[in-house]
Amino acid sequence: MEDLHRANIKRSLYDCLTMNAEQYSQFLSEIEKLASLNVGDKVYFRGLIELSNICVKNCYYCGIRRGNTNVHRYQLPIEDVMSAVEISFQQHYGSIVIQAGERSDSVFVDYISKILRAVKHKYGGQIGITLSLGEQSRETLKEWFELGAHRYLLRIETSNKELYQKWHPNNSLHDYDKRLETLHLLRELGYQVGTGVLIGGPFQTVDNLVDDLLFFKEIDVDMVGMGPFISHPNTPFYNKLETNADLRSRYDLALRMISALRWLMPNINIAAATSLQAIDPMGREMAVKAGANIIMPNVTPQTSRVDYQLYPNKPCIDEEAWECKGCLDARLSMVDRCVGYDELGDSPHFFERL
Ligand code: 5AD
Ligand code: SF4
Ligand code: FES
């Protein structure tokens, strides 16, 4: 019985990812109703701070992988981080996301702890804090949680272990099981947990993506952020698959993934990935139409944005932190949505599972 149910869900997800444009546009109106009913009509902003592009890892797809020697490496001084937090606060974003390349040495851990202490001291609980800092030890994650971080994003990248191994070097730094364990650990420690995958990467099939959606459901995540793979010239995956048509079909597939996930997990938070906007100027707004309810406007100081390019064509590189607000606000009104300013915008799913 259980197996039959799962097989039916799998079939529906597969259909959703492969339906034609006309069918999909009908499905979209259902999805809009479903989203409105379960997470409301508002879109929540998280000010994204790209703290540092120093990374110990060497993921084959990523532009800031350790092996790319063409990148100017930076780490924001704490004062710059604090002004980015202040901008988010002044812009009424409600939450910040602190993201960086992966490091777990004690100097880095202390640097993050120091930032968290400073944010807590200045803002108390007035601004939500999400971390996106890769795999860390239990002690570190516990310390950061106690210092006020309450959400954590750790993309599994793909839920298929064999595919994971094709996308990463074969060494202990890139261990699928450890990544999975960290996701469980985050939940055990009390974080709201987010994960996600790359869409349309080399060797990936539609079946893999269906399994990714089922994986999100199985581990019962609170938030998901997933976006299309965009090949970066200074990575081993450059030209593994690259035609313009491919780029567009990955974009379409990413929107369908969002809709399929909204159908499967109606009350979680789903982020409109910035990489969608690297393909289409209205990418993030289209993601909202497809079922997403979170957008992360970049608040990194403009001088560092150019160095944090996981993929080429990243939007908003030349804008100052305050410029994205009006821009996104106007774009969202084009798809009839408004912004939940000054609200934390936690996923209803998190409260339900508590
Ligand atoms: N294209 C799209 N997304 C990418 N990421 C890394 N490299 C790329 C790329 N070439 C994503 C990964 C990572 C997130 C921060 O950025 O999924 O988890
Ligand atoms: Fe580092 Fe993340 Fe890029 Fe991998 S995807 S190389 S962990 S920044
Ligand atoms: Fe950044 Fe438009 S969203 S400038």
Image (cartoon, rainbow, N blue to C red):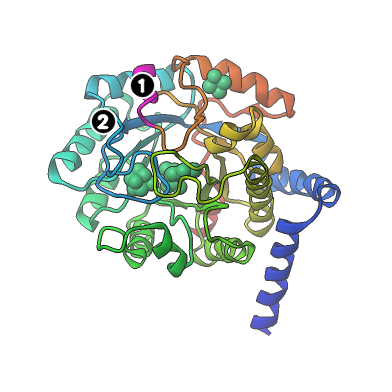
| Mark 2 or 1, closer to the camera | 2
Mark 2 to mark 1 CA distance (whole Å): 19 Å
Task: Name the residue tied to disc 2.
Answer: 73
Residue 302 belongs to the span the image colors magenta: yes
Residue 150 in view: no
| Residue at 70%, 57% in the rendered image | 17
Answer with mark 2 or mark 1, whichever residue precedes in sequence. 2
2 and 1 marks in contact (CB < 8 Å)? no
Residue 334 sits in quarter: top right
What amino acid is labelled 1 in the image? Answer: Ala
SS at mark 2? Answer: loop
Q: Assign ligand 3 to one image quadrant.
A: top right
208 or 267, which is in the foreground?
208
Near-viewer residue (45 or 133): 133
Q: Residue at x 43, y 57 (%)?
A: 156
**In percent of the image, x 45 and y 26: which residue is there?**
298
- Residue under the image location 26 percent in, 30 percent down: 73
